[in-house]
Image (tube, grey):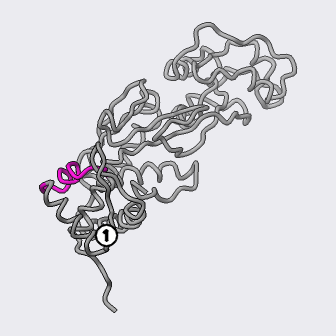
Amino acid sequence: MPRNLPPLNALRAFEAAGRLGSFTRAAEELNVSHSAISRHVRGLEDRLNVHLFRTQNTGVALTDQGRAFLADVTPALDRIAYATEALTVPPTGTVTLTTENTVAQKWLIPRLANLKARHPEVDLRLSVTSQLMDIEAHDFDLGLRYLHNRSVEGYHLLFQSAVRAYAAPGFAEVSNGTPDIAALASGPLIEEATFRLWPEWFALAGLKEIPDLTQPHPLSALLAIQSAVSGLGAVLMDKNLCELERTSGALVELSEVEIPFGGYYLAINARAGRRKAVRAVCQWLLDECAEHRGIEQLASPGS
């Protein structure tokens, strides 16, 4: 039997108005007039014999039936759009991403060659700031952050991370083939502002008498890593932020003792998440994180 389907333009008008909560914004998104949106929605309501919207002082709002219908229509239209894009052009265009300096330098930028090889027509533009951005208010497509001990609205966990101890080769005294933990506790130790965890780390490493290790002026992550590379002390650091130094041999791991601490989080601007280039960058990020967490695909934006 043939499918009982409303006109596609009516579904698009309803979906945009319901998702955006405004006939005016739906008209702007679909590049049609406000009256066209109103006409399509009214025709759809007549066809279905239900009220999908109700009028209120601030504009329009979905009815219970409208919300239920939108919950099915949005992913259905998304799937049609994704299937169409998959058969047509590759991802192209500019994607904007806000992140912090340490994550940009130590985790993201070393991986950008992989993105360029996979999607040469995607231009990823970075904005580096220490401020945790509301990406929709500041009109960024994506936000990538290292966060610890907190949940930030709009940011979703990519993978959990952990802190380990590192130092330049030959820095730590060795006893029976392994670094002497008691000698290490006597310093010098480098304290990074986020990972002020030396007492906890030494306790986990089995040191019974832990000296006062508090330092008055902790360093930024970049300075802490560079200080350790220069042989100025041992450092506790997120293992992903010193990956380059570990791989090159500039830093060595002093112990397998680690403290689960924080994670990497991604935020997606709902207004941009349907663009193929944005979804391509999101999937690339998830693939880069695959070794840390078993994520194969990103949920459809807006789901």
Between 179 and 284, which is closer to the camera in this rendering?
284
Residue located 66% across and 15% down the image? 189
**Structural crowding at the residue carrying mark 1, measured as other residues with C-alpha within 10 Å and reported as few (<14), some (14–19) or many (≥20):** few
Between 55 and 275, which is closer to the camera in this rendering?
55
Magenta segment includes 27: yes
Q: Looking at the figure, which quarter contains the C terminus?
A: bottom left
Q: Is residue 168 visible?
A: yes
Q: Is residue 107 above or below residue 280?
A: above
Q: In the picture provided, is 4 more to the left or to the right than 292?
A: left
Highlighted magenta segment, given as a residue range: 20-33
- Identify the main secondary structure in magenta: helix
Q: Looking at the figure, which quarter contains the N terminus?
A: bottom left
Q: Secondary structure at mark 1?
A: helix
Farthest right residue? 208
The image quarter containing residue 254 is top right
Residue located 32% across and 66% down the image? 77
- Could you tell me how many numbered marks the image carries? 1
Q: Position of residue 27 (x, y in %)?
A: 18, 53
Q: Position of residue 87 (x, y in %)?
A: 27, 70
Q: Position of residue 92 (x, y in %)?
A: 24, 53
Residue located 42% across and 54% down the image? 283
Q: Position of residue 275 (x, y in %)?
A: 29, 54
Residue located 43% across and 38% down the image? 144
Q: In the picture provided, is 291 more to the left or to the right than 215?
A: left
Between 79 and 240, which is closer to the camera in this rendering?
79
Q: Which residue is mark 1?
A: 80
Farthest top residue? 216
Q: Is residue 117 visible?
A: no
**Tag 1: residue type?**
Ile
Magenta segment includes 178: no
The image quarter containing residue 64 is bottom left
